[in-house]
Amino acid sequence: QNQQAKGGKLMITGDKVTLKTGAVIDLSGKEGGETYLGGDERGEGKNGIQLAKKTTLEKGSTINVSGKEKGGRAIVWGDIALINGNINAQGSDIAETGGFVETSGHYLSIDDNVIVKTKEWLLDPENVSIEAPSDTRSDTEIDSEFPTGLGTESSPRKNNATKTILTNATISNFLKNAKVMNITATQKLTVNSSIDLQGGNLTLHTQRGGIEINADITSSGDNDNSKLNIHSGSWVDIHKNITLGEGYLNITAGDSVAFEGDTKHKGRPVSEAVIEAQGLITSGKGKGFRFNNVTLNGTGAGLRFTNQKKSGDSWWINGIENKFDGNLNISGNVNVSIDASGGRWNTRLGKNTYWNVSILNVSPHSNFSLSIDTSGRSAGQARQANGKGLNGMIFNNDNTFNVKKGSTVNFKIKTSILTPHKDSNYASFNGNISVRGGGSVNFNLDASSNDYATSGVIIKSQNFNVSEGSTLNLQAAGSTETAFSIKNNLTLNATGGNILLRQIEGTDSRVNNGVVAEKNITFKGGNITFGSQKATTKIKGNVTIEQNTNATLRGAYYGGSKKTLDITGDVTNNGNLITEGSIININGNLTVSKGANLQAVTNYTFNVASSFNNNGISNISIARGGAKFKDINNTSSLNITTNSDATYGTAIEGNITNS
């Protein structure tokens, strides 16, 4: 002990090293000294130091490297390390000037009786399991953590062959007093009992194995300053709650990261699985995420999920698979951003992101975004993908988005340049979509501008339902062969809300079809905009606009474009219909019912191949061309204004009946 200068340095090594009950190593001083018991840092054996096979700190033993101004260093290492004593590395302010303590070994036991006072505590065994104290444990904790052997020379106590056990109470108590603890393992690290950070800083680290969280990690008291750092050389599976308030959660994995119940509890209630913090969660290179029945509360700056990336042609991503299953609750700001860009086109294929969420609940004034960037420096052909995913999004089953007023949900895909083949796509909607709550759900396909058109979106849904003042906005921009391909009869029900399904103008060099519907489209209530701003819109079935519906049907209406709005079947308008486009062709009957309104605005021509039956109010205006009709039957108000020329004239090829 030297209170006027720095404490000394002491090294004790041997085959077996024991600090007995009542024994004291005192290297305190103005600045704390250094002691090495059984080995050096992480058992590296530098400078020829002997590494102990077994090192024991018995209950009531003490290592003191504290300092009036600054704490010192205490290193305890053993192949088997039994820690049950006191280690003091305090400084004048333990959180600022406290010292460093390391207790390490291939098999490490930390007893409840341990008292460690320091700024930073490193625990570094081979495998780690964090458990609750056992009811049958003796004061030395040997029976629980080293269950076999008699404790004699001929029959020594042996640790569990696959795990090293630490107690959660020891960890929580230490974090309350000292703030910083690092637990590292060469292989796997498992948390099986709850930990309270209490405003401290805990790091869980594995070199090669995964990290599994099977119990709650919380932070009481000063939780704004809490930090949980998880660094895994492999995967991370979080099966329980991590609730840090406005504290920080940072995860870096070498493989996938999962937030889901364990095998027996996949169907857990979403309210019982909460991740609450702010921070960055990063999966491995080319690896993704799994979310199953979980609540994500992004406090402060929010939660951001992304993947590690390696640039250059040599990076073979082979697709990044993400899965969203069950129910998902969102509050605050949550951003999932997958980066599969860079490299040649054939390195960016293989898998997809699967959205199998039954209900997404988004709290008021919150935001959730999911984006995928699969753009790159070279083009290819989708047929060469041989049925592999294009790193896009697949919306399976029926999806409900309960998004409160003032909140938004954003999906975005930035595509590669792949010439389409059969049903190749960057997004597929396979179930019905419902949006309620008063907020907005946006989907954006951003296709690269190029001389080659790429794949777009396939919609197999039969119903889009939007209510309670909500908005559903699906849009695509860029060079696509077909931006939206609708395969089945589709009813757009926006009663009390808004639906927009559009191809919009963008910085594209080539765009062919904007929206193509193979069958019937029904507009039912609310405000609905449907079609293409810069490309052809095709509806190969019938169009029905029901009462109390404000619908806009749009073909190319951009600059001097002469692309068309083509409707193969009948158009029946029982509500309010606006048609816009350069050229509008209706190959069936056009019927405007009593009490309905039609406002048709075109640049060049408006053509109805069969009967035009007007029983409501219809105004048709052609800016630089004419119109063609067969039979016109009018019982109400009809106004047609044309500006015919040699190219686009006006013709009535049948009868006009006005009654």
Image: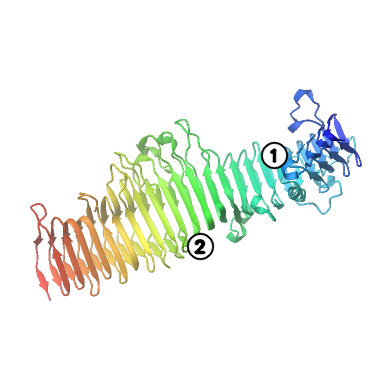
Residue positioned 23% across, 75% down in the render: 594
Going by the picture, which residue comes out furthest to the top?
48
Q: Position of residue 641 (x, y in %)?
A: 13, 63
Depth check: 387 or 322 in front? 322
| Secondary structure beneath label 2 | loop
Residue 364: mark in rendering? 2
Residue positioned 28% across, 43% down in the render: 510
Going by the picture, which residue comes out furthest to the bottom?
659
Relative to residue 648, is residue 438 drawn left or right?
right
Q: Position of residue 258 (x, y in %)?
A: 58, 48
Q: Is residue 426 above or below residue 76?
A: below
Disc 2 to disc 1: CB gap under 8 Å: no
Going by the picture, which residue comes out furthest to the right?
22
Q: Is residue 557 above or below residue 657?
A: above
Task: Give the image quarter of residue 607.
Answer: bottom left
Q: Position of residue 281 (x, y in %)?
A: 57, 45
What amino acid is found at the position of numbered circle 2 in the picture?
A: Pro
- 3D distance between C-alphas at marks 2 and 1: 40 Å
- Is residue 36 visible in this depiction of the protein? yes
Relative to residue 555, is residue 659 drawn left or right?
left
| Secondary structure beneath label 1 | strand
Q: Is residue 505 above or below residue 379?
A: below
Task: Characterize the local packing of mark 2: few (<14), some (14-19) or many (20 or more) Cα atoms within 10 angstroms.
Answer: some
Depth check: 276 or 27 in front? 27
Task: Characterize the local packing of mark 1: few (<14), some (14-19) or many (20 or more) Cα atoms within 10 angstroms.
Answer: many
Mark positioned earlier in the residue sequence (2 or 1): 1
Residue linked to disc 1 = 184
Depth check: 528 or 237 in front? 528
